[in-house]
Amino acid sequence: MEKVPGDGDMEQRERADQLSEEEKGMIQDTWGRVYENCEDVGVSVLIRFFVNFPSAKQYFSQFRDMEDAEEMERSLQLRKHAQRVMNAINSVVENLQDPDKVSSILALVGKAHAVKHKVEPMYFKILSGVILEVLAEDYPDSFTPEVQRAWAKLMGLVYWHVTGAYTEVGWVQLSSSAV
Ligand code: HEM
C-alpha cells in the first residue's frame, strides 16, 4: 500500500518542546536513582503495561497468552525487554546534551519496532504514560510536579522521534475508518 503522508495517528506528531538545561538536569538527577534499580523498575513498568493493556502482549511470542502477572514476571522475554527499554532510556538520558545522538538512538528503536516487530506506534504512547506513572509512584520524593513535567516532556520527545522513524519507513496506520 502507498505511504499516505500525514495519515492517521501521525497527526499527533507535533514537535515536543526542547528541554531546558534545568529540565535536563532534573531528569538526569532523578534517573540516577531510578537506574540503580533498573531491573525492578523495568519489570514493574512492563507488568503494569501488559496487565492494563493486554493487547500489547500480542507481539511477544513467549507470553502473549499469559494472563497471570506472576507468571509474566518470570518470563525471560519480558525481563529482557524490560532491560532493553531501561537501557535505551538510559542512553537517551546520558546523551541529553547531544541531540543528534538522541535522534539516532530513537530512530533505531523506532525503525526496529516498525519494520521488524510491526508494533502499532500508539503502544509507545501508552507505555510512556505507564513509565511516568510508575516513576512518580515509586519515587514520590524525587518526582515532584516539576520533575514530572520535565519527564513528561522527555517522553513526548521519545514518542516524537520514534514515530518520526515510523513515518520514515512508510508505516501506514490502519485506523478503523480505513478498514
Ligand atoms: C520506549 C519504548 C521501547 C524501547 C526503548 C524498546 C526497546 C527495544 C529494544 C532495544 C529491542 C531489541 C532490539 C531489536 O529487536 O531491534 C526491543 C525488542 C522488542 N520490542 Fe521494544 N522497546 C520499546 C517499546 C516497545 C513496545 C511498546 C512494544 C510492543 C507493545 C515493543 C515490542 C518489542 C518486541 C516484540 C521486541 C522483540 C522481542 C524479542 O525478540 O524477544 N517494544 N525493544
Image (cartoon, rainbow, N blue to C red):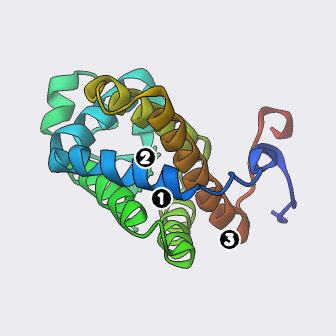
- Secondary structure of the residue carrying tag 1 is loop
Give the CA separation, mark 2 to mark 3: 19 Å
Residue contact between numbered discs 2 and 1, judged by CB atoms under 8 Å:
yes
Q: Residues within 10 Å of mark 1 (few under 14, many from 20)?
A: few
CA–CA distance in space, label 1 to label 3: 13 Å
Query: In the drawing, does residue 116 fall left or right of residue 35?
Result: right
According to the image, label 3 marks what residue?
169
The N terminus sits in image quarter? bottom right
Q: Is mark 2 within 8 Å of ligand 1?
A: yes
Q: Earlier in the sequence, mark 2 or mark 3?
A: 2
Residue 85 coordinates in the image, percent (x, y): 34, 53
Mark 2 or mark 3: which is in front? 3
Q: Nearer the viewer, residue 71 or 24?
A: 24
| Residue 49 picture location, percent across and down | 39, 31
Asked whether residue 76 is in view, the answer is no
Rendered image: mark on residue 117? 1
Q: Which mark is residue 178?
A: none
Camera-nearest label, 1 or 3:
3
* Mark 1 C-beta closer than 8 Å to ligand 1: yes
Residue at x-position 56% and y-position 78%? 100
| Residue kind at label 3, given as amino acid type | Val
Q: Are marks 2 and 3 in contact (CB under 8 Å)?
A: no
Q: Residue at x 42, y 22 (%)?
A: 52
Q: Nearer the viewer, residue 130 or 22?
A: 22
Residue at image location 65% in from the left, 57% down from the top:
18
